[in-house]
Amino acid sequence: MSRSVIVIDDDEDTVRLFSEFLEEKGIKVIGKGHDGVTAVKLYKEKKPDVALIDLNMPNGSGFYAIKKIREFDPEARILAVTADGSSSTEEKLEKLNVPIIQKPFNMEQIISKINH
């Protein structure tokens, strides 16, 4: 069974490239957005298997989106996508039980985390 995802990143090229690659690998992209507020709205509407969310975005950061999505669905599977490799960011994500994918990312690693 193919997994469904939403892809949220403030960089439109990243969203497009991510989406194209995921679709090629049989993962259905059911929503795309560019900010935290849209991430929450799309998650509630589409109820994806996995949400890929950038952390540094305007109009609601990734942390905002993760918090709001988890309030709505405590079991939500979220992968944080970020270039921020600071220990404070990693600690925050660990407490939230959200795996981190570092930019520049390895697409095979992402596929593995989505399907895991």
Image (cartoon, grey):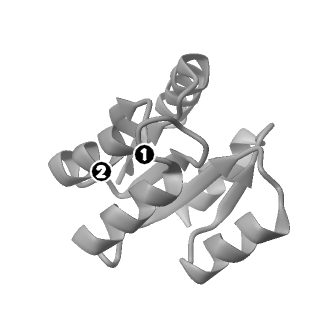
Crowd around label 2: few <14 · some 14–19 · many ≥20 (10 Å) = many
Using the image, tell me which numbered label, if any, was put on residue 108.
none
Q: Earlier in the sequence, mark 1 or mark 2?
A: 2
Q: Tell which tag, 1 or 2, sits nearer the viewer.
A: 1
CB within 8 Å, label 1 to label 2: yes
Viewer-closest of 16 and 108: 16
Look at 49% across and 28% down and name the residue there: 19
- Place of residue 37 in the rendered image (x, y in percent of width and height, measured from the top left): 32, 43
Element assignment for label 1: loop
Which quarter shows the C terminus? bottom right
Using the image, tell me which numbered label, if any, was put on residue 40.
2
- Which residue ends up furthest to the bottom in the rendered image? 95
- Place of residue 2 in the rendered image (x, y in percent of width and height, measured from the top left): 37, 48
- Which residue ends up furthest to the left in the rendered image? 45
Element assignment for label 2: helix
In this rendering, the answer to whether 51 lies above or below 99 is above
Q: Residue 11's image quarter? A: top right
In this rendering, the answer to whether 99 lies above or below 110 is below
Q: Residue 25's image quarter? A: top right
Viewer-closest of 84 and 48: 84
- Place of residue 50 in the rendered image (x, y in percent of width and height, measured from the top left): 42, 56
**As shown in the figure, which amino acid type bears the numbered disc 2?**
Val
Look at 38% across and 31% down and name the residue there: 33
Kindly identify which residue carries mark 1.
Answer: 60
In this rendering, the answer to whether 79 lies above or below 107 is below
Look at 83% across and 60% down and name the residue there: 86
Viewer-closest of 66 and 76: 66
